[in-house]
Amino acid sequence: MKKLLLRRLKSLLPALFTTTMLQAQTNPAKPKTTFIYHDAMEFPVIDKYHQEHNYNRLPEKFKATVRPEVWALSLNSAGIAIRFRSNAAAISAKWKVKNNASMNHMTATGIKGLDLYALVNNNWQFVNSGIPDNSGSSERTLLNGEQQVEREYLLFLPLYDGVDSLSIGVNAGAEITPPASQFLLDKKPIVYYGSSIAQGGCASRPGMAYTNILVRKLQRPIINFGFSGNGMFETNVGEALCETDPALFVIDCNPNTTPDLIHERAVKLVQQIRTCKPGVPILLVENFMYESAYFTPSVKEIALKKQAELKKAYADLQKLGFKNLYYMTGENFIGEDHEGTVDGVHPTDVGMERFAAHILPTLQKLTKGKP
């Protein structure tokens, strides 16, 4: 029996060899792309308000004035993105992160990866993610097309790590230039001050943070002042807010602030902003209810106290004559099926989509007609 099987195998080998050769001739291996790299700083950096040569969210001077925790988080590049134009068939990126951070409840791509989008029919369409290496230094092909097509691109940076260096590569012979269209370059930003949820926890990739979803939906930059665990209505952060030139301020700090501090701090922060930016609308946003609140009465009690304190601050500011001040309750931000979070607190991509969809009409209304 063994001899018979061997004879049959030998008789099949020439046919197998011929088939393999024919496949190799008709489907030759694609040659490896040679990329020419360019420093991403050569192109417009959006969703960042200062002009320092880095991808940090606060300029260096604030290291001495904000709490160390806020400063460390400001080195994360959440929300920051690069705008460029290229006719490349293939696009790559090389980047090095500051901390090579990791968390148990958030993907590495969301923490320290990249997301590339292309402008298609005046909408931003997802192309690919730059999935990071474990070493902290990564190189990834983001587009591997077969034709050179001129397009506008948007590259979102990591949410929960900083970027030491970033280069964008295009195939040899292709061009890469600053953008020709003014999408995301011709409007004043929304400045969003909040918590870990605003920073992007726990989106699976940078483009799925709700602030970044809103950037694409609104075609307007959003400067992300979400500081994980540390968005606390602080006036020293308010100093940075006052340095921006926004169409709208959104203050969403209830999640990180204890009930006893919310009223006083919210009032002071709004007064500070109204003094430095008298004509800019301000939107106060309540905390939504965490999932544990439905099973633990003490958690629900604290959440309701937070909402009550922010409502009181809003009412008192109105009594003081503050205009152009708006309020949004925490209801229905991530849906009603209790399936919008990864840990009962931080949204999944489903929760991020719902959050963005819920707040979008309000942001559209408050920025309508604004430059």
Image (spheres, rainbow, N blue to C red):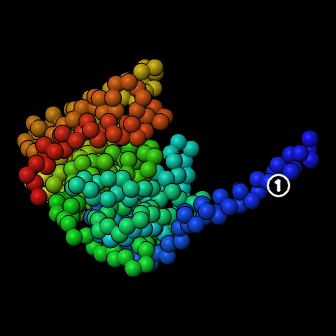
The front one of 49 and 135 is 135
Q: Is residue 155 left or right of residue 152?
A: right
Q: Position of residue 261 (x, y in %)?
A: 32, 39
The front one of 206 and 128 is 128
Viewer can see residue 237:
no
User: At 19% across and 37% down in the image, what residue appears?
Assistant: 327
Q: Is residue 67 above or below residue 336?
A: below
User: At 58% across and 66% down in the image, what residue appears?
Assistant: 25
Find residue 258 and report its image quarter. Answer: top left
Q: Is residue 189 above or below residue 96?
A: above
Find residue 265 and report its image quarter. Answer: top left
Q: Which residue is mark 1?
A: 10
Quadrant including the N terminus: top right
Q: Is residue 92 left or right of residue 60?
A: right
User: At 77% across and 57% down in the image, what residue appears?
Assistant: 13
Quadrant including the C terminus: bottom left
Find residue 183 and report its image quarter. Answer: bottom left
Q: Residues within 10 Å of mark 1 (few under 14, many from 20)?
A: few
> Tag 1, which secondary structure?
helix
Q: Position of residue 180 (x, y in %)?
A: 21, 70
User: At 38% across and 43% down in the image, what residue appears?
Assistant: 197
Q: Position of residue 330 (x, y in %)?
A: 28, 32
Q: Is residue 213 above or below residue 171?
A: above
Q: Position of residue 24 (x, y in %)?
A: 60, 64
Q: Specify the amino acid type for callout 1.
A: Lys
